[in-house]
Image: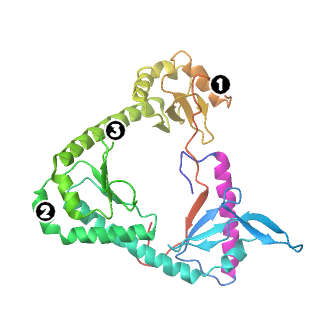
Amino acid sequence: VGAEYAVSLSEQERQVEALTTLEYGLSSLYQDGMAFEGLSIQLYHPDMCPVESYAYMDENGDYQMQTSYMKSYIADDGTVHLVADSSTIKEQIRALDLDRARMLAFVADFWLGRVKELTPAVQGLLGVKAVWCDTKTEQNSQKFVIWAGYLLEKREDILRCLGGRSFAFSLIVHSESDGPLINFHTSSPILNVRTDCPPQHLIEFLVSETGVAASEAATEVQSSREREEALLEKVRKAFGLKCIIKICMNDKVLEGAQRLLDNADLIKGSVNLKGASLALDDCYELWDSGFISVPYNFKINELPNKIKLLQAGQRITDSSSSNGNGAPSAPSLVARAATARPHASS
């Protein structure tokens, strides 16, 4: 029901309100004999849910527009979408065909199960670091399963062409129709492949000079990320932080992290950051989630006092830096009842 570091206090309160409303509705209907095992529920707080507008003719024959909460519905994957309105939650649930929701969820879970079974086989066959699939929709899962099956049917030919090669990049298989069949950028260790990419086309890319260069670039990117993670972990331990993250993609952000580490004793002598969550960004700010945002190009002589002001809940105006917002919180919650069917997704 929300990320540990990204959810603001107000969003957490909305989540608790929504879940409390859902608990009320389910408990009341359960006592009336309704069963909810195996259902996936996507829950919307009234303040955050989508709205629907529709036209109607009033008693005077004039057309009017009315806006209201979205209607509850069952998605193609069986997920039950509800608005956490205590006055209507029970009626919303009663109006839905929950047996149909279970059937659709079972089918969706079947395809997810096949994705999980085929992913390791595709990874081993291609010699890539990892394989991920876009499973946001049942159709995406189906397309991956069909693509993977076609690939595995040509196992012997592929093994012969690859000749035992291995690659440092990972594969993301997606169903987006726009963009090239195969897409790779030197700043990423990910190779994007469409589900309509012919196996021969993929194999030709892997054994080409471009494929070799992509693997070398992925190795360098991964090494750079490992060094970055190691440095941030040293900073976290030095200050006793709960978490430290990098927001700006500026290369100088890591220089800021190194300056924090180099001046840790001096900074700790003036301000206590134990248990805090720190974000290396482009401004001083206290996020709703509790994160303390610090500019990567901070001045060491002003850093402790500005952090103290933020810890005291005071806003700092800095005209030289832009607004550094925290990560956006999701407008919906996802809850899942205990399931008793096979191939259940986690």
Query: Residue flagged by tag 1: what amino acid is it?
Result: Thr
Vertically, is 269 above or below 233?
Answer: above
Q: Is residue 308 left or right of residue 63?
A: left
Among numbered discs 3 and 2, the one appearing first in the sequence = 2
Q: In the rendering, which numbered label is found on residue 317?
A: 1
Q: Secondary structure at mark 2?
A: helix
Q: Quadrant of the C terminus?
A: bottom left
Query: Residue flagged by tag 3: what amino acid is it?
Result: Arg
Vertically, is 61 above or below 279?
Answer: below
> How many labels sit on residues?
3
The image quarter in which residue 30 lies: bottom right
Q: Secondary structure at mark 3?
A: helix
Q: How many residues crowd mark 2 within 10 Å: few (<14), some (14–19), many (20+)?
A: some
Residue at 41% of width from left, 78% of height from top?
A: 342
Q: In the rendering, which numbered label is found on residue 225?
A: 3
Residue 242 percent coordinates (x, y) = 50, 39
**Is residue 22 covered in magenta?**
yes
**Is residue 21 covered in magenta?**
yes
Among numbered discs 2 and 1, the one appearing first in the sequence = 2
Query: Residue flagged by tag 2: what amino acid is it?
Result: Leu
Residue at 69% of width from left, 74% of height from top?
A: 92
Front position in the image: 175 or 332:
175
Among numbered discs 3 and 1, the one appearing first in the sequence = 3
Q: CA distance from mark 2 to mark 1?
A: 60 Å
- Which range of residues does the magenta coloring cover? 9-31
Residue 319 percent coordinates (x, y) = 62, 23
Q: Which residue is mark 2?
A: 159
Q: Is residue 246 visible?
A: yes
Front position in the image: 61 or 37:
61
Which mark lies nearer to you, 3 or 2? 2
